[in-house]
Image (spheres, grey):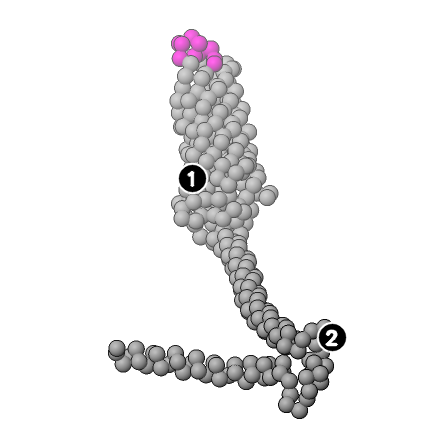
Amino acid sequence: MSPSHHVRNLTVGAVAAIAAFVAWPGAAEAQAGFQCKSTETQPECHARLKCRADEDLEDCQRRLRDAGERRDDQRDDDRARGSDDDRRGGSRSDRRDRGRDDDRARSDRRGRGGRDRSRRGGGRRGGGGDRGGFVANKTFGLGLELGQPSGLTGKYFFADKVAFDFGVGWIYRHYYYDDGLHLYGDVLFHPVSLASNPSFELPLYIGFGLRFWDFEYCYQNVCGYDGSVVGLRIPFGIAFDFNNAPIDIFLQLVPTFDFVDDDYRDRYDDRTHTGIDLSAGFRFWFN
């Protein structure tokens, strides 16, 4: 047997001896409590131990000894249950503490997320300009448009990146025709921002829409002919969208495909026409 085994066996024996030595005085005292004293008679011992009247002294001593052992066992069980309850209580307390920590962490993340979104958007309604994206910070605006056409224009964002724009104005001598009233409406998509900083966004937009143009024109030096157009529009442009002011400025090209109704077109059976309109303008945003 190796020296380490000898040391381990000696250690175990020493621990057992110490435990027996510590427990022995209590056990001896309990055992002595059930014995008769040398100075008393058996009836005096019977009376001191409070034995039952019909019970022999030996039976009484045995009953008392067994009862003491049961009490000791019960105390051991109670101590064991108390230790388990303490451990469970500690576990429940730990779980509550962890739950509170998790709640605080979630609250902190929500707070940081809100602050981060606010910083990224520079006060924008939905975020704005992150990683080349665009989110509108305005809802409805009206302004002026110059070029082809010229007149009033409006724009309404019904989603973060999608808007409806419209215009009521005039086109001057377009396609060799004379002046005429022009109406249009488009749906615009803003897929990307070409530039983004705290002062402004530069979103690129593209869309599709319809237009109506009612005009007059001249033919062989005779004026006063009437015509009209219903056409398709494909607007493509950029907008300088200021974050800290309720204003934007836009520049756009609009390819058109028109279905023409007038005497000249009827005569030569030429009822379609394509072209490109160019315009610029600004809007004041109310919200």
Residue 3 % position (x, y) = 27, 81
In this picture, residue 42 sits left or right of residue 204 = right
Q: Are marks 2 and 1 in contact (CB under 8 Å)?
A: no
Name the foreground residue: 10 vs 210.
Answer: 10
Name the foreground residue: 118 vs 9.
Answer: 9
Instruction: Please determine whether, in this image, residue 3 is positioned above or below residue 199.
Output: below
The residue positioned 57% from the left and 68% from the top of the image is: 77
Q: Main secondary structure of the magenta part?
A: helix
Q: Badge 2, how many Cα within 10 Å: few under 14, some, many 20+? A: few
The residue positioned 48% from the left and 19% from the top of the image is: 229
Q: Quadrant of the C terminus?
A: top right
Residue 131 % position (x, y) = 40, 48
Name the foreground residue: 19 vs 187.
Answer: 19
For mark 2, give the secondary structure: loop
Instruction: Please determine whether, in this image, residue 125 is positioned above or below residue 172.
Output: below
Residue type pointed to by label 2: Ala
Residue 191: numbered disc: 1
Please report the bounds of the magenta region as a residue range: 261-270
In this picture, residue 166 sits left or right of residue 37 = left
The residue positioned 40% from the left and 83% from the top of the image is: 14
Closer to the N terminus: mark 2 or mark 1? 2
The residue positioned 71% from the left and 83% from the top of the image is: 43
**Would residue 211 be seen by someone viewing this image from the given angle?**
yes
Residue type pointed to by label 1: Pro
Residue 53: numbered disc: 2
Instruction: Please determine whether, in this image, residue 64 is positioned above or below residue 271.
Output: below
Q: Quadrant of the N terminus?
A: bottom left
Distance between mark 2 and mark 1 Cα atoms: 104 Å
Q: Which quarter of the figure has residue 252? A: top left
